[in-house]
Image (tube, rainbow, N blue to C red):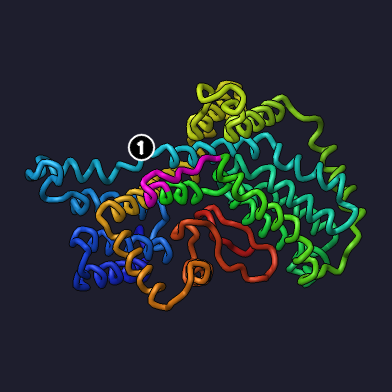
């Protein structure tokens, strides 16, 4: 059986329940039925009825099959739609033409170069070799490593789990700080918490630091009629101050909350230097990866346009394709490497499905109706805009406790139980599994 029966039945029951609820005033039947389908799909993702990519394919199929996005009459001409089935298929696949979706998918492919060349791991050990004599120094080394890798690693699974986590685990093990031995309090628990929180904070600093960020950009553009269209540079400019403040304070706060037993770590620098000796000098492919890394940051930040004007402006998606093309041309990545990057292709598919459904919920007027209901509800409480925003923020934050999937929300993140050594799994961004 290709699906889990209980989560599937729950998803179907929720979709059917919404479908059968009388359509509220001000909402079209099409919009309400698409909402029912959307609720069922999100429930299937949360319950892990099937892998998220498979659920996305089914969502695309259902939208095309039901024709739920196609009006019976063309609103522009007033005539019946000539080929509703063909239009429904076109609508269902429409988001595969979205540059932001391909940007994040291709950026995940680029991040494979950091893993393949070992450049990401080298970064981690280099910083620890310099600042690793104290536990706080090791913590900040992990933070800096994650921060440097974030712009070209949209899979926080790859960044936090496959690159930074092994470095952190090696340091913890060198001090015999293992959960199996009940010694995680020595240093490992603290470093694991720093690794996790650095991973999440860096997600907010860059559009390309986690897969759901481009979805936020798209939803904002659609909600404002493209009056607000965030670029890579504007996103970074808005987030750099709160993000860097959080990055600086986070290791200190965690040190106070979960004070490690070991506070001086001279062995960490020796271990890092030993690992670097084992890795040897930087290879040709590492240098190429570093150069392409720098080029991508320059183009994403819009520096050529600042110097040479509008003519040199580069689209973020185009920049990402340039990076992947250079990696393929130089042999750092092969086409087989790209084909084997399952998480990238998976991301393209499920993003296409969720963005498509969110887009048509907006086009069919449901988002506008819901926003009006929410606005009138908050206004009825007599709150000013500051209190209203605070209420919405609290609702968003605590809604995380009802979601096991970061993919089911517009941004990554979920509650983190403070047991030891939890890293993202390959299933989807935002999920975590004890190791």
Which quarter of the rendering shows the N terminus? bottom left
Which quarter of the rendering shows the C terminus? bottom right
Residue 301 lies left or right of residue 408; in this view the side is right
Characterize the local packing of mark 1: few (<14), some (14-19) or many (20 or more) Cα atoms within 10 angstroms: few
Residue 215: where, in percent of width, then height?
Answer: 45, 49
Residue 307: where, in percent of width, then height?
Answer: 62, 24
As for residue 231 lying within the magenta part, the answer is yes
Q: Is mark 1 on a helix, strand or loop?
A: helix
Residue 357 lies left or right of residue 104; in this view the side is left
Residue 300 lies left or right of residue 48; in this view the side is right
What residue do we see at 67% from left, 26% from top? 288
Foreground residue, 370 or 123?
370
What residue do we see at 50% from left, 54% from top? 428
Residue 154: where, in percent of width, then height?
Answer: 56, 45
Image position of 392 with respect to 128: above or below: below
Image position of 50 with respect to 117: above or below: below
As for residue 176 lying within the magenta part, the answer is no
Q: In which quarter of the image is residue 37?
A: bottom left
Q: Is the magenta stretch mostly helix, strand or loop?
A: loop
Foreground residue, 330 or 239?
239
The answer to whether residue 178 of the structure is visible from this angle is no
Foreground residue, 427 or 237?
237
Judged from this view, the residue extending furthest toward the bottom is 381
Query: What residue is pinned by disc 1?
Result: 97
Query: Magenta region: which residues?
Result: 221-232
Residue 302: where, in percent of width, then height?
Answer: 58, 32
């Amino acid at each position: 059986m290709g699906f889990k029966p209980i989560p599937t039945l729950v998803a179907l029951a929720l979709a059917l329940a919404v479908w059968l609820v009388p359509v509220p005033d001000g909402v079209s039947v099409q919009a309400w039925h698409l909402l029912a389908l959307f609720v069922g799909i999100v429930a299937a993702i949360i319950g892990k009825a099937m892998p998220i990519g498979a659920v996305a394919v089914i969502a695309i199929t259902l939208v095309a099959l039901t024709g739920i996005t196609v009006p019976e009459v063309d609103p522009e001409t007033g005539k019946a739609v000539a080929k509703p089935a063909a239009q429904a298929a076109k609508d269902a696949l429409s988001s595969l033409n979205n540059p932001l979706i391909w940007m994040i998918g291709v950026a995940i492919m680029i991040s494979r170069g950091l893993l393949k060349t070992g450049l990401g791991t080298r970064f981690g050990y280099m910083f620890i070799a310099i600042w690793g004599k104290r536990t706080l120094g090791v913590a900040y080394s992990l933070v800096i490593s994650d921060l440097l890798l974030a712009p070209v690693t949209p899979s926080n699974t790859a960044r936090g789990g496959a690159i930074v986590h092994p470095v952190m685990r090696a340091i913890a093990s060198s001090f015999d700080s293992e959960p199996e031995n009940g010694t995680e309090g020595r240093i490992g628990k603290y470093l694991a918490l720093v690794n996790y929180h650095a991973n999440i904070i860096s997600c907010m600093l860059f559009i390309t630091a986690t897969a759901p960020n481009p979805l936020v950009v798209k939803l904002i553009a659609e909600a404002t009629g493209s009056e607000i269209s965030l670029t890579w540079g504007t996103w970074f400019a808005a987030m750099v101050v709160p993000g860097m403040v959080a990055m600086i304070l986070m290791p200190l706060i965690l040190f106070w909350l979960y004070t490690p037993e070991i506070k001086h770590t001279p062995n960490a620098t020796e271990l890092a230097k030993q690992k670097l000796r084992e890795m040897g000098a930087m290879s040709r492919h590492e240098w190429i990866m570093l150069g392409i890394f720098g080029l991508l940051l320059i183009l994403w930040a819009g520096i050529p346009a600042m110097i040479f004007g509008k003519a040199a402006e580069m689209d973020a998606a185009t920049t990402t394709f340039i990076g992947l093309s250079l990696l393929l041309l130089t042999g750092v990545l092969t086409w087989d490497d790209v084909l084997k990057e399952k998480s990238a292709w998976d991301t393209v598919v499920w993003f296409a499905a969720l963005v498509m459904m969110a887009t048509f919920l907006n086009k069919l007027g449901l988002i506008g109706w819901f926003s009006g209901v929410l606005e009138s509800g908050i206004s009825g409480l007599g709150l000013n805009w500051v209190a209203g925003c605070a209420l919405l923020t609290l609702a968003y934050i605590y809604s995380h406790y009802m979601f096991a999937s970061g993919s089911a929300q517009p941004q990554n993140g979920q509650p983190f139980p403070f047991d030891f050594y939890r890293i993202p799994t390959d299933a989807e961004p935002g999920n975590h599994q004890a190791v």
